[in-house]
Image (cartoon, rainbow, N blue to C red):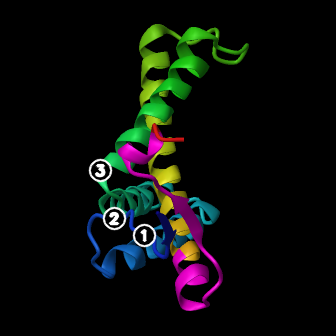
Amino acid sequence: MSYRVKRIDPYWMKNPVLPAVAIVGVLVAMVAVQRAMFPVAIIAAVIAGLAIFLATKPAVSAVLATLGLLGGLTTFVVVPNSQNAAMTTPLRLLSMLLFTMFYTVLMDGVVLLVAVLYNLFAGAIGLGGLSLDLEDEGDAGGA
């Protein structure tokens, strides 16, 4: 059996306000950083991150959080570089936690952007999408 993937759906909450909130939050955070308004930038970035996190299915976020945790654990605890070697243990754990959160939100955003672009190219424009060749369990042992 051959199937064509026409659409990728990693969206959990499909409210159209969430992408707008994420984009506006990122833009406000960038402008606030340029103007040295760091509390505003932090609040805007947190709001954008929450919008991205809420827009992504929990399984996708959990996989990416696990990868972020492993990356943070490796970078800050197991094999710290020369800049991280002087950090205390609580500071290393905090760095690992922040790295995990940032990585999860950033990669959730990347997954959502990839899904939007794939759906645009494969569906709306009509370019070829991914193909999956699946076989029944009974067919697997026959040949």
Residue 93 spot, x, y in % from top left: 43, 19
Q: Nearer the viewer, residue 2 or 42?
A: 2
Question: For residue 14, which quarter of the picture?
Answer: bottom left
Residue 132 spot, x, y in % from top left: 53, 60
Residue 10 spot, x, y in % from top left: 39, 62
Q: Is residue 23 above or below residue 80?
A: below
Of callouts 1 and 2, which one flags the residue occurring earlier in the amino acid sequence?
1
Helix or strand or loop: what does disc 2 sit on?
Answer: helix
Residue beneath disc 3 = 58
Of callouts 1 and 3, which one flags the residue occurring earlier in the amino acid sequence?
1
Observer-side mark, 1 or 3, equals 3
Helix or strand or loop: what does disc 3 sit on?
Answer: helix
Would residue 41 be found to the left or right of residue 47 on screen? right
Label 1, label 3: how many angstroms apart (C-alpha)?
17 Å
Label 1, label 2: how many angstroms apart (C-alpha)?
10 Å
Q: Is residue 11 above or below residue 142?
A: below
Q: Which residue is at a point 63% across and 11% down the rendered structure image?
A: 79
Queried whether the magenta region covers residue 135, the answer comes back as yes
Question: For residue 117, which quarter of the picture?
Answer: bottom right
Q: Nearer the viewer, residue 3 or 141?
A: 141
Which disc is residue 22 wearing?
A: 1
Q: Which residue is at a point 51% across and 64% down the rendered structure image?
A: 29
Would residue 46 be found to the left or right of residue 125 on screen? left
Q: Which residue is at a point 60% across and 21% down the rendered structure image?
A: 75
Helix or strand or loop: what does disc 1 sit on?
Answer: helix
| Amino acid type assigned to the residue bearing label 3 in the image | Pro
Which range of residues does the magenta coloring cover? 119-140
Label 3, label 2: how many angstroms apart (C-alpha)?
9 Å
Residue beneath disc 2 = 55
Residue 32 seen anywhere in this rendered image of the structure: no
| Amino acid type assigned to the residue bearing label 2 in the image | Ala
